[in-house]
Image (cartoon, rainbow, N blue to C red):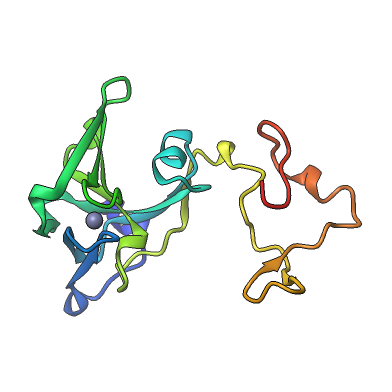
Amino acid sequence: MRKAAILGKPWEASETTAVAGQCLCGAVEIEIDAPARWAWHDHSSATRRVHGAAYATYVGSWRRRFRVTRGQADITRFKDEATGTTRSFCARCGTPLVYERARSAHMVNIPRALFTGRTGREPRYHVAIDQLQDWTYLGEPLVPLKGFPGVVWERPTRNPTRNSTRKKRGPSSGGWS
Ligand SMILES: [Zn+2]
């Protein structure tokens, strides 16, 4: 338990509670006992592809503190033999549900976005940060795009050195690419 204490801030025992999550279509519902063990951002290419996103934020839970509360029959799995990882999805809507690693048999990793409530851990850690994509939004200032309500954009910088501070991976992208 010493490691768990290092990985996150203390959590009052009286605050321990079940936190529910679900897939996009609602067929699958899951639950973990909070606090989760830890939480992190995963920038690896495999996770990027699976989520179709710049990176994914995971909450790691002890397996015994994780439950599928609805829709077990709607869960499908993909095992990557090369890496020893297994990823589960909702067979109806495709939402990634659980990411398991053979080398961490007692842990299950769940996309943070499935939960609406607090999980008891802040995602302060990064995995594969060397694979951070140059198109990842990092909080740059945004302004409304004229004529497109609800759309904001990052104005091209006048400072040519700004983009060079990002790690370049593959062709540079801009705008809507
Ligand atoms: Zn679903």
From the viewer's perspective, is 60 left or right of 136? left
Foreground pick, 150 / 58: 150
Residue 1 appearing in the image: no
The quarter of the picture where residue 8 lies is bottom left
From the viewer's perspective, is 171 left or right of 126? right
Does 28 sit above or below residue 88? below
Residue placed at 46% from the left, 52% from the top? 125
Question: Of all residues shown, which one is farthest toward the front?
Answer: 147
Residue placed at 35% from the left, 59% from the top? 112
Residue placed at 25% from the left, 61% from the top? 25
Question: Of all residues shown, which one is farthest toward the bottom?
Answer: 14
Q: Position of residue 141 (x, y in %)?
A: 73, 68
Foreground pick, 46 / 17: 46
Does 79 sit above or below residue 150? above
Foreground pick, 94 / 31: 94
Quarter for ligand 1?
Answer: bottom left
Residue placed at 9% from the left, 51% from the top? 72
Residue 145 appearing in the image: yes
Q: Position of residue 46 (x, y in %)?
A: 42, 34
Q: Position of residue 68 (x, y in %)?
A: 11, 56
Question: Of all residues shown, which one is farthest toward the top?
Answer: 82
Does 15 sit above or below residue 114? below
Q: Position of residue 107 (x, y in %)?
A: 21, 45
- In this rendering, the count of numbered labels is 0
The quarter of the picture where residue 29 lies is bottom left
